[in-house]
Image: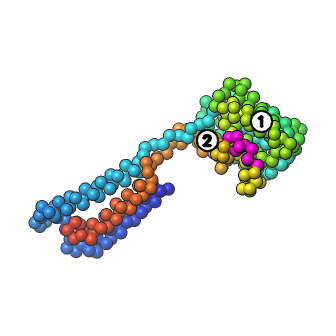
Amino acid sequence: MIFVAACVLSVAVSAAAIVLARRRTQGQHLPIAAGGRPTTSRSRLVYLGAVGVVAAIAGLLAWSVNGGTGHSPALPGETILAIDVSGSITANGDKMIARTLNSFVDYPPDRRAAVVYFSSTAVLGSPPSSPAADLAPLSRMFSPLVARTRGPWASQFDGGTVISNAIALSRRILAYTHVKDGRVVLISDLQDDVKDLPKLHTALVRLWAAHASLSLDPLPPTRDIPLSLAQLSEPYREVFGDNIIIRKPFLASSTNGHAVAHTGILQARDPLFGLLLALLLGASALAVSFFPRLVWRLA
């Protein structure tokens, strides 16, 4: 965004310099031998110095803006999505679950992911050998029509919530598949049974000790209420730190929903420095236009 602003401002200031120069250059000319006009060493030196300053500023601007192509976001290890299908999940929550699943549509084919469904109990819904890209079709299970009847889980799950069971099962799956850098994404409104909190803490500590990471994808209404989100996420942040909350569902895949090959971006070495140089470059062009012997005849 800063790079775009730098370009826009530089072009605008340079355009203003040309307009003003046209108004002031009825008899102006550069201090070079053109059109039979004599020139002096001093005027030639001043002109070349001004050109050098502008060229240096332009070079610094190009250097500061073009930092090369950035690396793709680092992908986590094998992923386990722990999806809350308890009675407290709202229709908006189902939509967000669907968007999270859809974010894996272009995931690299060599990456695997498992799905754990839970309420007061937890079961493995998709094996850890499944390609992560295969998660996207599961979003149909959370469409408004299907979710209204609690999908295919009506007879398998009750309406309660015991999140520790989901965390514990996820850890066992990672251990069974010998994954050392795995990640668990908890997709829930985080409204756990109060009696489960001690077991939840133990399960989280064991998951952390297994060198796995945890991400929270809070569902409405918790996501939309900052105070509730802060309170309900505290047990997880206490173990894994504050930077575990996924701000947008499509970021759950860590590639913004696109394949790794498509996520490289142009990075600036110092965007703010580039903006200042762009302004300085435009200001230099504007200043030069006010010196009669430094501007080419325009009119």
In the rendered structure, which segment of residues is drawn in magenta? 232-240
Image x and y of residue 286, in percent: 32, 67
Q: Mark 1 points at which residue?
A: 202
Where is 123 relative to 192, above or below? above
Q: Can residue 13 be seen in this view?
A: yes
Q: In which quarter of the image is residue 172?
A: top right
With 295 as the anchor, is 255 left or right in this view? right
Determine the residue positioned at 80% across, 51% down.
Answer: 90
Seen from the viewer's position, the closer of residues 31 and 98 is 31
What amino acid type should be assigned to the residue bearing mark 1?
A: Thr
With 178 as the anchor, is 158 left or right in this view? right
How many marks overall? 2
Image x and y of residue 2, in percent: 47, 56
**Tag 1: Cα neighbours inside 10 Å, few (<14), some, or many (≥20)?**
some
Determine the CA span between mark 2 and mark 1: 27 Å
Quarter of the image containing the C terminus? Answer: bottom left
Q: Mark 2 points at which residue?
A: 254
First in sequence: mark 2 vs mark 1: 1
Please tell me whether residue 233 belongs to the stretch shown in magenta. yes
Where is 48 relative to 144, above or below? below
Please tell me whether residue 279 belongs to the stretch shown in magenta. no
What amino acid type should be assigned to the residue bearing mark 2?
A: Ser
With 197 as the anchor, is 181 left or right in this view? left
Image x and y of residue 107, in percent: 62, 37
Element on which disc 2 rests? loop
Element on which disc 1 rests? helix
Seen from the viewer's position, the closer of residues 259 and 205 is 205
Image x and y of residue 211, in percent: 66, 32
